[in-house]
Image: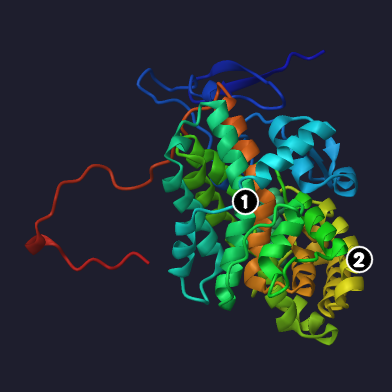
Amino acid sequence: MPEETLSITDNRTATSYTIPIEHGAIRAMDLRQIKTSPEDFGLMTYDPAFMNTACCQSRITYIDGDKGILLYRGYPIEQLAEHCTYLEVAYLLLYGELPTAAQLEEWAQAITHHTMLHENTKRIIEAFRHDAHPMGVLASAVAALSTFYPEAKNVHDPAVRRLQILRLLGKIPTIAAYAYRHSLGYPYVYPDNDLSYTENFMNMLWRMAEPKFQPNRTLARALDVLFILHADHEQNCSTNAMRSIGSSLADPYLTMAGAIAALSGPLHGGANEAVLRMLNEIGSKDNIPAFIKKVKAGECKLMGFGHRVYKNYDPRARIIKQIAEEVFEVTGRNPLIDIARELEKIALEDEYFVKRKLYPNVDFYSGIIYQAMGFRPEMFTVLFAIGRTAGWLAQWQEMLEDPAQKIARPRQLYLGHARRDFVPMEQRAVAELVR
Ligand code: SDX
C-alpha cells in the first residue's frame, strides 16, 4: 500500500519534502516549510474563488458533482424529499440524526413558539419603500434581530445557540411574509400556531379577511419539499460567508444577514429570479435558437445552468421538475415551463454546454413553480433563504464546535508597489488613471 504522502522537490534549493496526505488533501500549512532561506515566509497556495481549496472538515452534506449525488448526513436528497418535512430535515442537518416522533414534536413546537416578531420589527420593515427588493428587507430585518437578543453573542454556549437557532428558524418565514405584505400594502398577518411550519408561512402571506386560512395541502407540501431541496449544499458562497463571518464570533443574526447578502447575487441564489426574467425575455420557443446563439457568443449566461460542483444534472432540479406538474394541477400550467423544457433539451444537445458540462441547477425550474404559486420574481430568492436557514445554521454551529477553526483570515500574493516615499502635491504629475 503506497504511503499516504506527497514527495515534493523544490528545484530552487534541490531540497525534498514529504507532505502527509489526509482525506485526499494536504495541509496548506505543511507547504510553509518549503523555503529558499530562513527569512523566506515559505510557500502558500494561490486559489482565487477557492476552486480547489477545502476550508473545513464537515459531516453535514456530501455532493458527488460527477454523479449528481446529494446526501444530507448520508441520506439521499430524493428519499428526504419524499418522506420528510422541512423541520425534520432541519433537525437532521443541525443534530446529525433523524428525530424520533417525540423529538420532532418538541422541535416543531419549540420553533412554532418563536414565530412572532418584536413589534418594533414591523416599523423597520415599514421604513422601506413598497418596491424595496425583499432580499434587502430580509437581510436588514435579520440583522436587526441582533439588537433584540444581545445574549446571542455568547455563541460558545450551546443553550444560547439553540435558542437563537429556534428563533431564526421560527422568525425567518414571518419576516419574509411581512416583507411580502408590506410590498403590497397589506396588513401583516400574525402566525397561526395551529398550522404546520409551511402552512403558517402561507397563512402569513395570503390570509385576507377570512377568519382562518385554509392552506392548499398540495401547494403546502410542494413548498415544504422546495425548502428541503434548498436546505443545505456544503460550502457554497453564502455558507462560506456564514462560516467566515461567524468565525469572528459575531452573533448568528448579523452573521446570517451576511449569508443572505451573499445569496442575493445572480450567480448564486438570485439566479432563480434571473431565470424567470430570462424566460420572459425569450418569450417563445421560436426565440430559443437566437438566445442560445447569444449565450454561446458570451453575450449572456443561460441562467439556472451550470454549477461549480455539479458536472452532471443537479438532483434537486430533477425533483423540482417533478413537483412542477403537481403544482400546476392546482394552479394551472405555467407556460414558461414549456420554454424551459425546450431550452434544456436544446442546451443539453449543444456542444457548447456539453463540453463545459453545463446542466440545469436548482434555480432553473424553481422560479416557474414559485410564479405559478403566485409569488413575484423578487420573492424567489427569499424562499431560497428560508430553506437555506437550516443549512447556514448547521454549518455555523459545526464551525464553532470545530477545534481546528479560528477566525478566517486568508493570505494574499502582494503584487503592488514596493515601499515608496510620500509625494507633495506640487510634485505630483498628472498620472494616467489606471483603468
Ligand atoms: C446556486 O455552490 C452552490 O452549491 C450553489 C447552489 C447552492 O445550493 O448553494 O447550488 C445554488 O448558486 C446554483 C447556481 C445558480 N447560478 C446560476 O444559475 C447562474 C448561471 N451559472 C453560472 O454563472 C455558473 O455556472 C456558476 C456561477 C453557477 C458556476 O460558475 P463557475 O463554476 O465559476 O464556472 P465558470 O463561470 O468558470 O464557467 C466555466 C465555463 C465558462 O466558459 P469558458 O470561459 O470556459 O469558455 O462555463 C461557462 C463559462 O462562461 N458557463 C456558462 C454558464 N455557466 C458557466 N455559460 C453560459 N451559461 C451559463 N450558465
Circle 2 sits in a helix, a strand or a loop, which is it?
helix
Q: What residue lies at 59% left-to-right and 77% top-to-bottom?
A: 184
Corner quadrant of residue 332:
bottom right
Identity of the residue drawn at 62% across and 31% down: 398
User: What x and y, as percent, mark residue 234?
Assistant: 69, 41
Residue of label 2: 326
Q: Is residue 125 left or right of residue 158?
A: left
Q: Is residue 324 visible?
A: yes
Name above or below for residue 31 compared with residue 224: above
Location of the C terminus by quadrant is bottom left
Mark toward the start of the polypeptide (1 vs 2)? 1
Q: CA distance from mark 1 to mark 2?
A: 29 Å
- Residue drawn at the location 71% of the way across and 41% of the way down: 109
Left or right: 151 as drawn, with respect to 186: left
Quarter holding ligand 1? bottom right
**Amino acid type shown at disc 1:** Thr
Residue on which the image places disc 1: 115
Q: Nearer the viewer, residue 152 or 433?
A: 152
Residue 172 in the image: above or below residue 101 = below
Classify mark 1: residues with Cα within 10 Å, few (<14), some (14-19) or many (20+): many
Residue 248 visible in image: no
Tag nearer the camera, 1 or 2:
1
Q: Is residue 415 left or right of residue 251?
A: left
> Ligand 1 within 8 A of label 2's CB?
no
Q: Toward the viewer: 249 or 154?
A: 154
- The amino acid at mark 2 is Glu
Q: Position of residue 344 (x, y in %)?
A: 85, 69
Q: Residues within 10 Å of mark 2 (few under 14, many from 20)?
A: some
Q: Vertical placement of 341 versus 40: above or below? A: below
The x, y position of residue 160, in whole percent, is 53, 31
Q: Residue furthest front?
A: 211
